[in-house]
Amino acid sequence: MADEFDVIVLGAGYAGLMCAVRLAGQTNKRGLRTALVSRDGQFCERLRLHERVAEPAFRPPARLPPLKEFLDGSGCAFIQGDVSEIERGSRSVRVLTAAGPRCLNYGQLVVALGSRADIHAVPGIDEHAYTLDATGPRSQPEFKHRRAALVGKSPRIVVVGGGATGIEVAAELKQIGGARVTIVEAGEFADFATDRVRRHLIEAAGRAGVEIRQQTLVESVEPSLITTNAGGIPFDVCVWCGGFKGQDVVAASGLDIDAQGRVRVDPYLRALSDPSVFVAGDACMPIEWHGAPARMSAFFALTTGAHVADIIARLHAGRRARPFGFWTYGQAIAVGRDAVGFATMPYDRQVGPIYRKRAAFLLRWFFVWLLVRLIALARRYPRLPFWLGRGAYRRKSAARYAAPGLLRRQSARQE
């Protein structure tokens, strides 16, 4: 027998947890039946997975209580388990829990399952490289276990990917005594940044002792060698930070996705192929301009999650939904205990001064702390506005799409 919910949120990352607590807080007095489904019982700060990765015993202290405790009394049920199938025809989700499989029926579904490292980008990644994913084979916990075996061995470490994640991971790994760390990038190092920011990042990586190889395309990963268009690079450990993609269970649901596995959505963050499905966070790819590029980031996840919650709450109250719009604020990349930070308002490109070293490191620490704090605040103040650019969508583009109708409060089996 299936459990019945009006709204089910899949995923308890930055997007899913923000959506769940904000929606529950706005609707718990109206009787909306909501549920949050997550594989893990504790919120994972993905932005901190690289922190002190060179220290096998280090675990960042949790800044939120366990999810069941955090949601207790909010009006949102918590279900811990793996999402194994999304069946849109019957509006149901199958979840594998510790007590066995469960079937959950929904009226509206929020997909916020995030992204994972693209381990099939080239042959051999899944067998011979580690990732900074929180769970799964050869993920961050397994890497830390492998790290313990490298003590006193001056390991050769190759980090594939010269984006923000690769830079942060490489600088942390340089803390391993005697480690020789190389970043391998297929294109230009730190290509997300302006020329000025890139120069500062190259200088910071140099101070950290990290070697950079640009324009070096990885063709395969072997047990102790990566082959590239510029020859082989031997390693003791390879960490793959070369790109992310959506979750397989989302692709298998038949939703319209792009090459990265992100679900294409309209200005109201509804899946183009199914208006009963909203999408937030890394899983979401708006097809219309909404103010700033939809870069996979924690802040984009928070804002999309919050906006989906606001839309569903407004529809349930019989009010009109508003299209999504947002601006970015800034970015800071840690390079060991060094960092480079800069403002990006509104269109995700560096503007104004560039902050460096200790000042930028503290700036990054503050924003990482603030992102979690905003989720905690949403638990108490579910209507708290926390981002600019809400009207940044193009009205003519939004007008091409039918606005969402009033939320239907019946399950698939009752229709």
Image: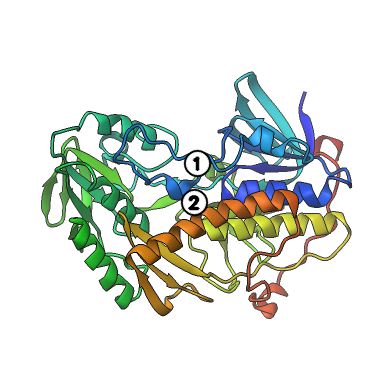
Q: Give, as a three-letter code, the residue at label 2.
A: Gly
Tag of residue 194: none
At label 2, counting other C-alpha atoms closer than 10 Å, the crowd grade (few under 14, some 14-19, many 20 or more) is many
Side (left or right) of 128 relative to 312: left
Against 349, is 174 above or below?
Answer: above
Q: Nearer the viewer, residue 13 or 49?
A: 49
Q: Nearer the viewer, residue 85 or 377?
A: 377
Side (left or right) of 314 relative to 204: right
Query: Could you say where residue 198 lies in the image, as x and y percent from the top left?
Result: 29, 71
Residue at image point 48% right, 72% down: 348
Name the residue at the left extreme.
Answer: 231
Tag of residue 248: 1
Against 52, is 147 above or below?
Answer: above
Against 358, is 342 above or below?
Answer: below
Residue at image point 38% right, 60% down: 361
Say which element carries label 1.
helix
Q: Nearer the viewer, residue 255 or 32?
A: 32
At label 1, counting other C-alpha atoms closer than 10 Å, the crowd grade (few under 14, some 14-19, many 20 or more) is few
Q: Give, as a three-letter code, the residue at label 1.
A: Asp
Write down the quadrant of residue 189 in the picture: bottom left
Residue at image point 26% right, 30% down: 148
Against 272, is 169 above or below?
Answer: above
Say which element carries label 2.
loop
Residue at image point 33% right, 48% down: 121
Query: Could you say where residue 395 lies in the image, as x and y percent from the top left?
Result: 69, 78
Q: Which residue is mark 2?
A: 261
Q: Is residue 256 something one can see in this rendering?
A: no
Choose the circle earlier in sequence order: 2 or 1: 1
The answer to whether the residue labelled 2 contacts the one labelled 1, judged by CB atoms less than 8 Å apart, is yes
